[in-house]
Image (spheres, helix red, strand yellow):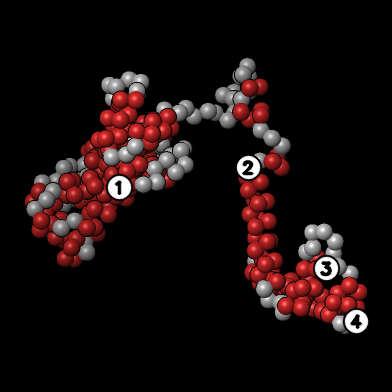
Amino acid sequence: MTAYALPIPAAGSLENYIQTVNSFPILTQEQETALGRRLRDHDDLSAARELVVSHLRVVVAIARGYMGYGLNQADLIQEGNIGLMKAVKRFDPERGVRLVSFAVHWIRAEMHEFILRNWRIVKVATTKAQRKLFFNLRSLKQGLGAMGASDAKKIATQLGVKAEEVVEMETRLSGQDVSLEPAGEEDEDSTFAPIAYLAAEEAEPAVLMEQEQTEQRRTAGLEQALGTLDPRSRRIIEARWLNENACATLHELAGEFGVSAERIRQIENKALTKMKGAMAAAV
């Protein structure tokens, strides 16, 4: 049998890719069984390649069913191809089952994971029931038009979820993406694009998140560094540097511990040096 190079789908030449995969011959069951045995018994990669390329058209056909999720079709096909390769690796030629029947599960599984990872709605489906709802709502809703309360209940019963979840998912699925920037420089509505209403650069979500994460790391590092001190040193540092009201003076702490102010200063300096070392090691 002829070994084929595995084509890679690209967004700019997707039609060429589809034409290429459709040109590969479909294997007979006898050919599949022979190739499966070669792969299983001899770890024959050329046999695995032939099994994969002969079923790439199946991945394309399945990917078309997920075009409504707004994701790049080439990326979706590539994920499906990963599922196909996993199926080929696990294919048992002695079961008498065609590879396509076995591979569909793996192809769909990879596509589902890709959609859930990358779709514009964050955490759209976090449970098994919600995933089922996510991937079946469109087909169940076909022909129903605008969804009413009775339709939501009917679908909820079919999928084993709450009617409220059906309504919420329908709202999310029917939402429209909004362009952040205007279509062109001469767009008359450019003044009203969302980009025009963003806050100052220092208030951008990414900047604020980075600042919050930095503050959290500092707080955690400070607490860890304080944990390396003995009780007296920690009390002195907290009283001198971490008191929100009024920081204690060296003389006040000297009276509290019954030592000289100079001794308090020495303990403070030693504790600060130890904390700096602990915080530097934690970075």
Label 4 – label 1 distance at C-alpha: 71 Å
Label of residue 260 in the image: 4
Q: Is residue 230 visible?
A: yes
Q: Which residue type does callout 2 highlight? A: Pro
- Residue 29 as seen in the image, left or right of residue 82: left
Q: Which residue type does callout 4 highlight? A: Ser
Dividing the image into 4 quarters, which one contains the C terminus? bottom right
* Residue under the point 67% across and 67% down: 223
Cβ atoms under marks 2 and 1 closer than 8 Å = no
Label 2 – label 1 distance at C-alpha: 33 Å
* Residue under the point 19% across and 49% down: 102
Of the two numbered discs 4 and 1 on the same chain, state the one appearing first in sequence: 1
Q: Secondary structure at mark 1?
A: helix
Say which residue label 3 marks. 240
Label 3 – label 1 distance at C-alpha: 59 Å
Q: Position of residue 267 (x, y in %)?
A: 82, 79
Q: Which residue type does callout 3 highlight? A: Arg
The residue furthest top is 188
Label of residue 109 in the image: 1
Label 4 – label 2 distance at C-alpha: 50 Å
Q: Secondary structure at mark 3?
A: helix
Q: Nearer the viewer, mark 4 or mark 1?
A: 4
Label 2 – label 3 distance at C-alpha: 35 Å
Of the two numbered discs 2 and 3 on the same chain, state the one appearing first in sequence: 2
Cβ atoms under marks 4 and 1 closer than 8 Å = no
- Residue 100 as seen in the image, left or right of residue 260: left
Instruction: Give the crowd class for mark 3: few <14, some 14-19, many >=20 residues within 10 Å.
Output: some
Q: Nearer the viewer, mark 2 or mark 1?
A: 2
- Using the image as rendered, state which of residue 100 and residue 135 is in the foreground: 135
Say which residue label 2 marks. 205
